[in-house]
Image (tube, grey):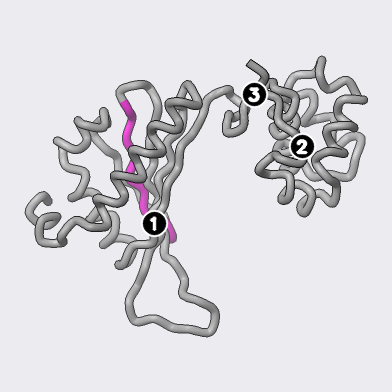
Amino acid sequence: MNTETSPREHPRAASIESGTGTALETWVQRITEAGGPDLDHSAIARLLPERWDITEWWAQGVTVAYEQVIGRRVVGQSCDGDFSASASRTVPGDLDAVRDRWAAFMTPARREQLGLEEPRLSDTVTWRYWRAAVADGSRVSVNITAKSGPAGRTSTEPRSTLGIEHKGLETAAGRDAWKAAWSRTLADFMTSPDDLLKENR
């Protein structure tokens, strides 16, 4: 199966050109002429800032995009060869209230249905985390942070962004399946009555 992607059709082509000042198509040509097809990921990522004006951070992104363009990895595949799925929603409430609500929503029965192990909670000044290992060896992190209102506006109702990151998935099909599962889970979470969640605490 041909997994090559056109540089112009790559989903990060615009951001790479904006961030580096060079079109992805040009980066692909440069890397190929420098022997890119015979170099591994680390070698390409080191080569870029040595030869051209690009930061190490962007060098990593360009390298991944190059490998996807030439078919070495498919779009969405990490440097380690695995995949990740993500989903997010804006939720009413402050950091602690939103995590408490999520923890109540993720009952033992729901976790068992999703194949999740016992969760671990941790805090920073600006983030709240709910993390769990998955039966298939992947891992889930639910990350919650305060969401600021539109510029020039103040709101009396606090809101938070709840983002789900599911990493370590082995296949693109697995990524797609989990992305759909987390989208459904978030939709159920958003419509769950608060009184029902309180009963599950």
Q: Disc 3 to disc 2, how far (Cα)? A: 14 Å
Return the disc, 1 or 3, that comes first in the chain's sequence.
3
Q: Position of residue 54 (x, y in %)?
A: 83, 44
User: Mark 1 packing: few (<14 Cα in 10 Å), some, or many (20+)?
Assistant: some
User: Mark 2 packing: few (<14 Cα in 10 Å), some, or many (20+)?
Assistant: many
Which residue is farthest front?
1
Check disc 3 and report its element: helix, strand or loop. loop
Residue where numbered disc 1 is placed: 89
Return the disc, 3 or 2, that comes first in the chain's sequence.
2
Q: Residue at x 83, y 32 (%)?
A: 28
Residue where numbered disc 3 is placed: 73
Q: Is residue 48 left or right of residue 84?
A: right
Give me the disc on residue 20. Answer: none
Asked whether disc 1 touches disc 3, contact meaning CB atoms under 8 Å apart, the reply is: no
**What's the amino acid at mark 1?**
Arg
Asked whether disc 3 touches disc 2, contact meaning CB atoms under 8 Å apart, the reply is: no
Q: Quadrant of the N terminus?
A: top right
Check disc 2 and report its element: helix, strand or loop. helix
The rendered magenta stretch, by its main secondary structure, is classed as strand
**What's the amino acid at mark 2?**
Pro
The magenta span reads 125-134
Q: Disc 1 to disc 3, how far (Cα)? A: 29 Å
Asked whether disc 1 touches disc 2, contact meaning CB atoms under 8 Å apart, the reply is: no
